[in-house]
Image (cartoon, rainbow, N blue to C red):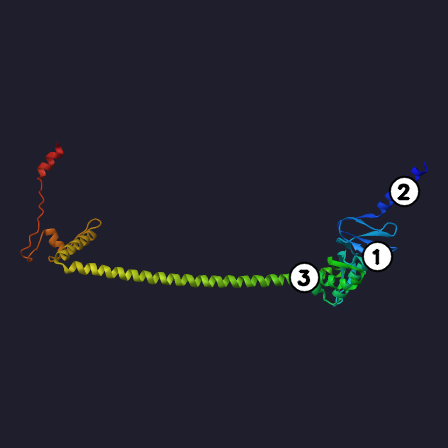
């Protein structure tokens, strides 16, 4: 009976010993293995691990990225303008041993140091710039400046600020309106500059287009004149060929005479007076008319009816 009790006690002790010698490391965690409160090693590999029971203990440390929202703070620019900065940071643990040794691995203590470092960096950087320079640099440029200076203050704590960004950079109510008016005026000047540049480019394009149109028209007119001259030369050549041959010349004169006669007799009540040597007269009377004395003209006779015949028709 006693032996059974002893066996049960031993079994329980073995189970407790085995349980106390095992620990688990989660993803994005690091485990500090300590002996009597002193860190002896850091385990970052996720999974199940062993430690010396009753002598070693383990403290998990989250080594992933964390977001910390810093309270708003008033800052003064180099030209003595007041501004309100609202920052937030993304930070992580880079040196687990140093983080444990300096801050005890407590995230609240780390955020206290981050708060002070980011505030000092924001104040120092903005105080070295005018208000206009701060407004112009807001964004990635100002973020990089604050992040770099903040890390220089907290490097001894084993933590790193990945990004310290001003999520809101506002103006006090007393000078907000004046700053907005100045910004609107500056943006108006920039817009006017872009508009003027665009109009200059447009005018340049129009001038170039007009130049090309003028050149094209001049070339077209030159080509048209060349074609007209070539056509007239061809016409004169054809006409010359027509007059060089007697038969062609006679036929050509005949056609020209007919065209002239047709043009002369257009309309009504036309009287045509012809020279006896003209080609048209020859056409109408069928050949050479000879001298004026030999000319024979057709006589139109009018038959007059007796008056009594007309009266007879009337009586009937």
Image coords of residue 104 (percent x, y) = 85, 56
Indicate the secondary structure of the residue bearing disc 2.
Answer: helix
Q: Nearer the viewer, mark 2 or mark 3?
A: 2
> Is label 2 in contact with label 3 (beta carbons under 8 Å)?
no
Q: Nearer the viewer, residue 102 or 162?
A: 102
Q: Which residue is mark 1?
A: 39
Q: Which quadrant holds the N terminus?
A: top right
**Alpha-carbon neighbours of circle 3 within 10 Å: few (<14), some, or many (≥20)?**
some
- Lower sequence index among marks 3 and 1: 1
Q: Quadrant of residue 180?
A: bottom right
**Alpha-carbon neighbours of circle 1 within 10 Å: few (<14), some, or many (≥20)?**
some
Q: CA distance from mark 3 to mark 1?
A: 56 Å
Q: Nearer the viewer, mark 2 or mark 1?
A: 2
Q: CA distance from mark 2 to mark 1?
A: 31 Å
Q: Nearer the viewer, residue 117 or 30?
A: 30
Q: Which mark, by number, is residue 10?
A: 2
Residue at 19% of width from left, 54% of height from top?
A: 260
Q: Which residue is mark 3?
A: 183
Image coords of residue 12 (percent x, y) = 88, 41
Q: Nearer the viewer, residue 316 or 130?
A: 130
- Lower sequence index among marks 2 and 3: 2
Residue at 30% of width from left, 62% of height from top?
A: 226
Residue farthest along the right direction in this orientation = 2
- Quick check: 79 left or right of 265? right
Image coords of residue 184 (percent x, y) = 66, 60
Residue at 92% of width from left, 40% of height from top?
A: 6
- Quick check: 129 left or right of 34? left
């Amino acid at each position: 009976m006693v032996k059974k009790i002893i066996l049960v006690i031993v079994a329980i002790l073995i189970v407790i010993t085995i349980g106390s010698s095992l620990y688990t490391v989660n993803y994005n965690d690091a485990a500090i293995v300590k002996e009597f409160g002193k860190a002896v090693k850091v385990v970052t590999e996720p999974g199940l691990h062993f430690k010396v029971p009753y002598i070693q203990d383990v403290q998990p440390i989250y080594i992933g990225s964390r977001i910390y929202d810093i309270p708003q703070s008033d800052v003064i620019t180099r030209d003595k303008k007041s501004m309100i900065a609202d920052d937030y940071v993304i930070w992580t643990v880079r040196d687990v041993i140093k983080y444990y040794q300096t801050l005890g691995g407590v995230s609240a203590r780390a955020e206290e140091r981050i708060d002070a470092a980011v505030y000092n960096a924001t104040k120092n950087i903005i105080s070295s710039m005018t208000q206009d320079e701060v407004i112009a640099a807001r964004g990635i440029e100002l973020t990089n400046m604050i992040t770099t200076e903040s890390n220089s203050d907290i490097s001894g704590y084993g933590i790193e600020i990945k990004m310290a960004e001003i999520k809101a950079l506002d103006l006090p109510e007393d000078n907000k309106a004046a700053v907005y008016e100045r910004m609107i005026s500056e943006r108006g000047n920039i817009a006017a500059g872009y508009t003027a540049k665009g109009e200059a480019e447009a005018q340049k394009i129009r001038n170039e287009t007009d130049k090309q149109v003028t050149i094209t028209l001049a070339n077209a007119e030159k080509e048209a004149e060349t074609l007209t001259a070539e056509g007239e030369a061809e016409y004169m050549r054809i006409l010359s060929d027509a007059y060089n041959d007697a038969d062609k010349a006679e036929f050509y004169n005949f056609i020209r005479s007919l065209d002239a006669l047709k043009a002369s007799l257009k309309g009504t009540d036309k009287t045509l007076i012809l020279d006896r040597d003209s080609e048209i007269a020859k056409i109408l009377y069928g050949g050479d008319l000879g001298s004026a004395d030999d000319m024979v003209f057709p006589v139109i006779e009018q038959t007059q009816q007796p008056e009594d015949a007309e009266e007879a028709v009337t009586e009937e």
